[in-house]
């Protein structure tokens, strides 16, 4: 999963971009001001442990959404 996909999910769930240090983009939640850092390397997939960490800090089910998306694509291919 690429950083762009994670960022899209974060924005849909109330996070907004507020800072960047090198290749790391930082987002804050509109209500609870929770801060999340996403390493942004456009051509590389994020490490599974990075995605799990983002899930823990945001209480979002990113991997579950990814699996649903993959299942939908696989069904369309059949």
Image: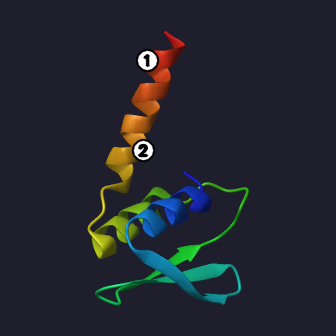
The numbered mark, 1 or 2, whose residue comes first in the sequence reads 2
Where residue 42 appears, x then y in whole percent?
A: 71, 61
Q: 40 or 9: nearer the eye?
A: 9
- Residue placed under numbered mark 2 in the picture: 66
Question: Residue at image x 59%, y 62%?
Answer: 3
Colour scheme shown: rainbow
Q: Is disc 2 placed on a helix, strand or loop?
A: helix
- Name the mark on residue 75: 1
**Vertical arrangement, residue 40 with respect to residue 22, above or below:** above
Residue 24: which quarter of the image? Answer: bottom right
Q: Residues within 10 Å of mark 2 (few under 14, many from 20)?
A: some
Residue 32: which quarter of the image? Answer: bottom left
Where residue 66 appears, x then y in whole percent?
A: 42, 44
- Name the mark on residue 54: none
In this rendering, position of residue 57 left or right of residue 23:
left
Question: Residue at image x 35%, y 90%?
Answer: 33
Badge 1 vs badge 2, beta-carbon distance below 8 Å: no
Q: 49 or 57: nearer the eye?
A: 57
Question: Residue at image x 43%, y 27%?
Answer: 72
Q: Residues within 10 Å of mark 1 (few under 14, many from 20)?
A: few
**Vertical arrangement, residue 66 with respect to residue 45, above or below:** above
In three-dimensional space, the C-alpha distance between marks 1 and 2, rounded to whole angstroms, equals: 14 Å
Where residue 68 appears, x then y in whole percent?
A: 37, 36
Where residue 38 appears, x then y in whole percent?
A: 54, 74
**Vertical arrangement, residue 55 with respect to residue 38, above or below:** above
Q: Tell how many labels.
A: 2
Q: Is disc 1 placed on a helix, strand or loop?
A: helix
Q: 28 or 57: nearer the eye?
A: 28
């Amino acid at each position: 999963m690429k950083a762009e996909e994670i960022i899209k999910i974060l924005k849909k769930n109330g996070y907004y971009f507020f800072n960047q240090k090198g290749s790391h983009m930082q987002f804050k939640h509109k209500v609870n001001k929770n801060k999340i850092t996403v390493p942004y390397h456009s051509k590389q997939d994020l490490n599974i442990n990075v995605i799990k960490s983002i899930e823990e800090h945001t209480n979002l089910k990113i991997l579950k959404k990814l699996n649903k998306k993959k299942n939908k694509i696989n069904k369309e291919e059949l």
